[in-house]
Amino acid sequence: MPYTELQAVGVHLPVVDLGVRYRRPVLYDQLIEVWVSIQELGRARVHFTYRLHLAGDSKPLATAYTVHAVTDSQGRVLRLDRYPDLWKKILSASAALSHPGA
C-alpha cells in the first residue's frame, strides 16, 4: 500500500521509536535485500521489524525495528479502525507481511 494512499485520507505514520543492530559490514555496490514484517499492529500504532542481508545470503547484515504512531497531519492520534476500508487493507497487508513468502 503506497504511503500516499494513507495521506490521501489524512493518516500519517510518524516514527516514534527505532533501533538498529549492525552485524556485518556492507561494501559499496553490494545488492542488499530488506525483509519487512509487522511485529504488532494496533489501532493507533504499527511496529515493523526489518532484516537486511546480501542478495542470496541468509546471514543478516543488520536487524532493525521502527514503531509508528497513527496520527493526523497535526500529530493528533487516530484510530485506524475508524477508516473501515483502509483498516481492511492494512489488516490484509499485515497478514501478508507477518508471513513472508505467502
Image (cartoon, rainbow, N blue to C red):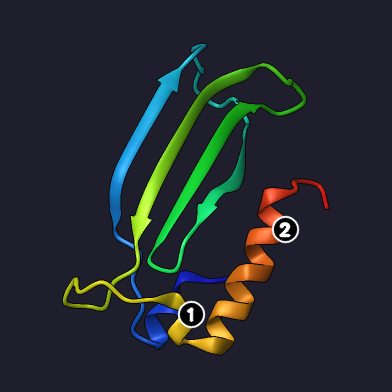
Q: Quadrant of residue 36?
A: top right
Q: Amino acid at mark 2?
A: Ala
Q: Quadrant of residue 78?
A: bottom left
Viewer-side residue, 54 vs 40? 40
Q: Disc 2 or 1, which lies upstream in sequence?
A: 1
Q: Going by the picture, which residue comes out furthest to the right?
A: 102
In the displayed structure image, the side of residue 2 where residue 56 appears, left or right: right
In the displayed structure image, the side of residue 51 where residue 99 appears, left or right: right
Task: Please tell me the numbered disc located at residue 61.
Answer: none
Is residue 74 shown above or below 31? below
- The residue depicted at 44 percent of the width and 18 percent of the height is 22
Which quadrant is home to the N terminus? bottom right
Viewer-side residue, 11 vs 34? 11
Query: In the rendered image, which residue does mark 2 sit on?
Result: 96
Q: Amino acid at mark 1?
A: Asp
Is residue 101 shown above or below 86? above
The residues bearing labels 2 and 1 have C-alpha atoms spaced at a distance of 19 Å
- The residue depicted at 62 percent of the width and 69 percent of the height is 91
Marks 2 and 1: which is nearer the front? 1
- The residue depicted at 72 percent of the width and 58 percent of the height is 96
- The residue depicted at 58 percent of the width and 88 percent of the height is 85
Residue 65: give x, y in percent of width and height.
44, 38
Task: Please tell me the numbered disc located at residue 81.
Answer: 1
Residue 30: give x, y in percent of width and height.
59, 25
